[in-house]
Image (tube, grey):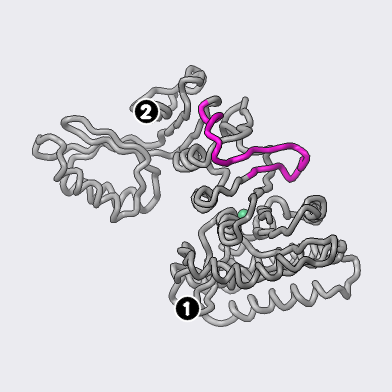
């Protein structure tokens, strides 16, 4: 049993949907398959905008976005289903009517609750289209609502998975269906939404932006899948973002641990929560190109042999480097550190790198419009703080194999930290 995940870019227009259907048809013969799908193209961003206008009572702007989202989906459906009487049109009509009806009532006070209720529509309609299109193409399948599979707490917008309830509900609903098959030569095919969960009481939740990868891992974990494949618009895992580095190299095979480290330092190709459930059951993860499905892509599994062969580069921009000094000229010690850490924790600011000396403690973190000034204000109550912003944090894994000259060219290194495998540099672009 395998789990395939397709992101928004893979179903952004009619031809992309056809391409996804082709990939599913080509791979489906070899056993039962669960397909996890995101919202189409930029739908989630548009729904976020819709939600913001809904909460602010900006009805005209809200309805305009509603119409746009609706039109995009109907345009795609009309292209895919030439028969204007096809059942998909009624199904979509109903889903959009549900949303319309909901946003016609005044909003409640809980932004995150309203967000999940509204933004989840993107995945609901994308899966309805794909499921119907596959049936049209002769591939019998069943659409299962993720709200009833992925059971979470009520932390709307960042819901925590209840692993016991989730495993039970996935196994109870999917295992009999996956076993039975759709016919003698046709293994079962399940379609479900990424990103969405539901509380035991039936409220819709979401797992955080880009959470569909995580959904795929949750399903694979619960079903003891043999493999997860994430289909992307890149050939696989690259050793740097090709928008930032001219020459990138494909990582053919890295270990779960290495992938976890890369995502910890900010590599964005896989949602960070995806890897641990897979690691715990030794389920391999492939990242493959939906443009070129015949290419092998990258494999993440328990093989650590290749981890150190290729250096990887991760760039974080818009960084602040703050140096924090005790006001009374004392040394930095545990009592000071505990005040500093609780200031960071209280403001929800994640520390990307830290270093201490006798008289100061230096911290690098993401700049944020609201959090950063509030944090600095609190730190200033107990310490003198000096800081630089507009910096970059460059992380190099396996830096012993790297050509660092190109990386630091035209940049001044303000702080450097090295472990056996990882080099981190806080740098400022020279003007
Ligand atoms: N549609 C959601 C998002 O864009 C979830 C996902 O794509 O993984 O964030
Ligand atoms: Mg997406």
Image location of residue 193, percent across then percent down: 64, 64
- What residue is rendered at 53% in x and 65% in y? 206
Residue 100 visible in the displayed image: yes
Q: Where residue 131 sits: x, y (%)? A: 76, 65
Decide which of 239, 325 is in the foreground and name it: 239
Q: Which mark is residue 419?
A: 2
- Find out whether residue 292 is within the magenta segment: yes
What residue is disc 1 on?
108
On the rendered structure, is 170 left or right of 330? right
Task: Report how many numbered discs are placed on residues in the image.
Answer: 2
Secondary structure of the residue carrying tag 1 is: loop
Secondary-structure class at tag 2? loop
Q: Is residue 171 left or right of residue 178?
A: left
Q: Look at the magenta stretch and give its main secondary structure.
A: loop
**Residue 228 location (% of width, % of height):** 64, 50
Is 420 placed above or below 170 here? above
Among the 4 quarters of the image, the one containing residue 331: top left
Which quadrant is the C terminus positioned in?
top left
Q: Residues within 10 Å of mark 2 (few under 14, many from 20)?
A: few
Foreground mark, 1 or 2, reads: 2
Q: Residues within 10 Å of mark 1 (few under 14, many from 20)?
A: few
Tell me what residue is drawn at x 43 percent, y 23 percent.
411
Question: Which region of the structure is painted magenta?
Answer: 286-308
Image quadrant containing the N terminus: bottom right
Q: Mark number for residue 75?
A: none
Residue at 49%, 23% (x, y): give it.
407
């Amino acid at each position: 049993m395998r789990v395939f995940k397709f992101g928004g870019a893979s179903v952004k227009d009619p031809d992309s949907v056809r391409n996804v259907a082709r990939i599913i048809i080509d791979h489906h013969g070899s056993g039962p398959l669960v397909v996890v799908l995101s919202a189409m193209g930029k739908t989630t961003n548009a729904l976020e905008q819709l939600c913001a206008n809904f909460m602010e009572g900006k009805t005209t702007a809200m309805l305009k976005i509603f119409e746009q989202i609706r039109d995009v989906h109907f345009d795609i459906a009309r292209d895919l289903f030439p028969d204007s009487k096809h059942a998909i049109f009624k199904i979509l009509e109903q889903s959009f009517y549900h949303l319309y009806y909901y946003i016609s009532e005044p909003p409640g006070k809980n932004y995150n609750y309203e967000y999940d209720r509204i933004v989840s529509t993107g995945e609901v309609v994308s899966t309805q289209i794909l499921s119907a299109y596959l049936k049209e193409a002769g591939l019998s399948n069943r659409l299962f609502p993720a709200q009833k599979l992925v059971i979470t707490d009520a932390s709307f917008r960042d819901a925590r998975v209840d692993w016991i309830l989730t495993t039970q509900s996935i196994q109870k609903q999917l295992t009999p269906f996956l076993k039975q098959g759709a016919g003698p030569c046709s293994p079962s095919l399940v379609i479900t939404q990424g990103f969405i969960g539901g509380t035991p009481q039936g409220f819709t939740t979401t797992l955080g932006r880009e959470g569909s990868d995580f959904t795929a891992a949750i399903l694979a974990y619960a079903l003891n899948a043999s493999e997860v494949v994430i289909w992307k618009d890149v050939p696989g895992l690259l050793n740097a973002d090709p928008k930032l580095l001219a020459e990138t190299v494909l990582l053919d095979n890295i270990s779960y641990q290495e992938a976890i480290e890369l995502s910890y330092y900010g590599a964005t190709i896989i949602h960070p929560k995806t890897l641990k459930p897979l690691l715990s059951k030794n389920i391999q993860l492939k990242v493959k190109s939906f443009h070129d499905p015949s290419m092998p892509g990258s494999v993440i599994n328990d093989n650590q042999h290749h981890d150190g062969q290729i250096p990887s580069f991760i760039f974080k921009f818009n960084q602040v480097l703050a140096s924090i000094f005790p006001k009374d000229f004392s040394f930095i010690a545990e009592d000071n550190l505990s005040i500093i850490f609780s200031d960071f924790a209280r403001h929800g600011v994640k520390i990307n790198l830290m270093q201490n000396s006798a008289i100061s403690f230096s911290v690098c973190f993401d700049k944020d419009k609201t959090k950063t000034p509030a944090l600095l204000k609190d730190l200033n109550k107990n310490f003198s703080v000096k800081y630089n912003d507009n910096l970059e944090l460059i992380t190099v894994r396996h830096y012993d194999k790297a050509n660092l000259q190109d990386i630091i060219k035209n940049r001044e290194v303000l702080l450097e930290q090295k472990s056996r495998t990882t080099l981190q540099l806080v740098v400022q672009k020279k003007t």
